[in-house]
Amino acid sequence: MSTPTERSTLQQRLRADLTTAMKARDELRTSTLRLALAAVKDAEVAGTTARVLDDAEVSKVLTREVKKRREAADAYAAAGRAEKAERERVEGEVLGEYLPRQLGDDELAAIIDRALAELDLSGPRAIGPAMKSVQAAVAGRAEGGRVAAMVKARLAGA
């Protein structure tokens, strides 16, 4: 854990990029980064004591924000508000630049297969232990719902 005055390198990068966006008068990037930093700040002060988040925790916050943007874009698109949907999608892409590269289906399948083989798991009752192992190996490089769907499919076929 870092000291109260230290910021994570990811958080420092967000702040530096915010300053750059403000100087460039890039309204979309500026507002997106401000919202992301506000979400990080909210996470820091949540709970009983305020604390500074490390890079992994900041990544989790950003992942949550990207997911919110994707869901909002889908909702706006379904409501016929294409302009709003596009803005949400672009905001999600801006935040996605700060996250680790997402795993492809083949890479994710290999991780799942390795975890299932190492723990000798099979059948639908093994979903909990399998998810715990796979999520640890994936470490934020794949969305939880996607991981769960692939784990369930692998266990159903086992």
Image: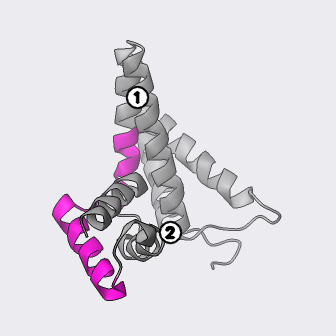
- Which residue lies at the image location 63% right of the left edge and 79% below the top edge? 1
The disc label shown at residue 113, or none: none
Q: Which of the image's four quarters has the C terminus? A: bottom left
State the residue at coordinates (24%, 64%): 157
Q: Is residue 54 above or below residue 87?
A: below
Residue at image location 41% in from the left, 64% down from the top: 140
- Which residue in the protein does label 1 denote? 73
Q: Secondary structure at mark 2?
A: helix
Q: Is residue 60 left or right of residue 153?
A: right
Residue span colored magenta: 92-120
Residue at figure coordinates x 34%, y 16% from the top left: 82
Q: Secondary structure at mark 1?
A: helix
Kindly indicate the quadrant of the structure image that contains residue 88. top left
**Image height of 154 relative to 111, above or below:** above
**Is residue 55 shown in magenta?**
no
In the image as oriented, which residue stretches furthest toward the left? 106
Residue 19 visible to the viewer: no
- In the picture shown, does residue 62 fall above or below 126? above
Residue 114 x/y as whole percent: 26, 80
Find disc 2 in the rendering and name its residue.
55
